[in-house]
Image (cartoon, rainbow, N blue to C red):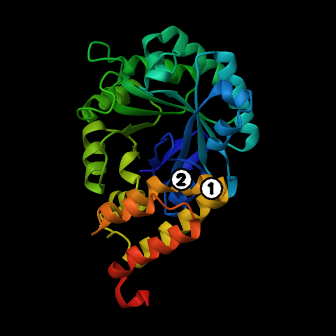
């Protein structure tokens, strides 16, 4: 099932999707350690990279050894700016540059970036060509099936991308107008796969190992990218890998292991962002980790009002103690 992205070989092409506010360095490092074949940064605006906007640059903090291979995802409208941002990230250690033609957010589309670029195939080609020519590392593309049901032009964009030198495509099985509503059309992704010879990755609505298997069968894709389902269960990608590789159904980690994962992730966020900001950013992750456990609503309401990082860690340990049992003593 392995694929090649230029000179980079992925034995298990089960990839962590780029997610704004989620796939920062601590989360990527955690998911990579738990077995992901490839991790992708949060999307960052190309002009913010060039101007060194501190808040945006933190999104693409790179730890080459622990994350390799790691992709930085760029968004933008100007080919020269995209090219320069790609060069800067290559210099900083990115193994892959990923171009965003898929973001449906209004603030991105209004800047004629993200999925808006699927409406202008000529200009899209300029961006792809300029970025590929600017760097020596592989360049990949993430897109949607099209802008709307009346314009599902992903197969044409795919051919343009391959001609420009793009080494891998990821297709989210929805149009821009769908945003995240309805269901991902895995079968349409097959038309993209049939249009090109480079690897195609399927994305959208993959929540379990069985979903991944079904998606691959319907799409004919070479691998899968998993996004929102990984929130609160970063071990899911490894479960998918083992299931696709040999049919093995891995259980979720035992509560004591989950506590260890949550605690290590929390401490990494504090180190990365500093205590004050780290506590706030960690809250959503703590909520995701605990949402399906007994008493989670009360726990979340309580811990989200705590600003002291040591007290938060103590609250997490107390919450997990009943699930762990006597070992917690």
Q: Which residue is mark 2?
A: 280
Q: Is residue 46 left or right of residue 246?
A: right
Label 2 and label 1: CA atoms lie apart by 7 Å
Depicted 88 relative to depicted 233: above or below: above
Q: Which residue is mark 1?
A: 276
User: Which of 41/98 is in front?
Assistant: 41
Task: Provide residue 86's location: percent of width, then percent of height.
Answer: 68, 30
Image point (41%, 56%), residue name: 237
> Pointers 2 and 1 in contact (CB under 8 A)?
yes
Depicted 294 relative to depicted 286: above or below: below
Depicted 315 relative to depicted 86: above or below: below
User: Mark 2 Cα within 10 Å, few/some/many (few <14, many 20+)?
Assistant: some
Image point (47%, 10%), residue name: 120
Local SS, label 2: helix
Q: Is residue 136 left or right of residue 114?
A: right
Residue 67 sits in quarter: bottom right
Image point (44%, 90%), residue name: 329
Task: Provide residue 249's location: percent of width, then percent of height.
Answer: 29, 67
């Amino acid at each position: 099932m392995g694929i090649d992205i230029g000179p980079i070989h992925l034995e298990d092409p089960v990839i962590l999707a780029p997610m704004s506010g989620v796939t920062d360095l601590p989360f990527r490092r955690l998911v990579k350690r738990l077995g992901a074949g490839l991790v992708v940064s949060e999307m960052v605006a190309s002009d913010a990279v060039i101007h060194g906007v501190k808040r945006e640059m933190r999104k693409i903090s790179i730890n080459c050894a622990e994350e390799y291979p790691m992709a930085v995802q760029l968004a933008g409208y100007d080919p020269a700016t995209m090219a320069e941002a790609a060069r800067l990230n290559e210099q900083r250690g990115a193994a892959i540059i990923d171009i965003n033609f898929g973001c449906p957010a209004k603030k991105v589309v209004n800047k004629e970036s993200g999925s808006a670029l699927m409406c202008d195939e000529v200009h899209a080609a300029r961006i792809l060509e300029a970025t590929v020519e600017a760097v020596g590392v592989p360049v990949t593309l993430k897109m949607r099936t099209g802008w709307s049901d009346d314009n599902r032009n992903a197969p044409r964009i795919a051919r343009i991308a391959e001609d420009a030198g793009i080494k891998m495509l990821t297709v989210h099985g929805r149009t821009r107008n769908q945003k995240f509503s309805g269901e991902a059309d895995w079968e349409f992704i097959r038309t993209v796969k049939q249009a090109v010879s480079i690897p195609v990755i399927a994305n959208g609505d993959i929540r379990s190992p069985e979903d991944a298997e079904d998606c691959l069968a319907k799409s004919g894709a070479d691998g899968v990218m998993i996004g929102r389902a990984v929130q609160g269960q970063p071990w899911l990608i490894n479960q998918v890998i083992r299931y696709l590789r040999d049919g093995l159904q891995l259980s979720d980690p035992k509560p004591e292991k989950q506590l260890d994962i949550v605690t290590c992730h929390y401490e990494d966020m504090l180190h990365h962002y500093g205590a004050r900001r780290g506590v706030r950013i960690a809250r959503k992750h703590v909520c995701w980790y605990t949402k399906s456990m007994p008493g989670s609503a009360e726990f979340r309401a309580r811990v989200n009002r705590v600003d002291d990082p040591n007290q938060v860690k103590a609250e997490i340990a107390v919450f997990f103690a009943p699930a762990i049992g006597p070992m917690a003593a």
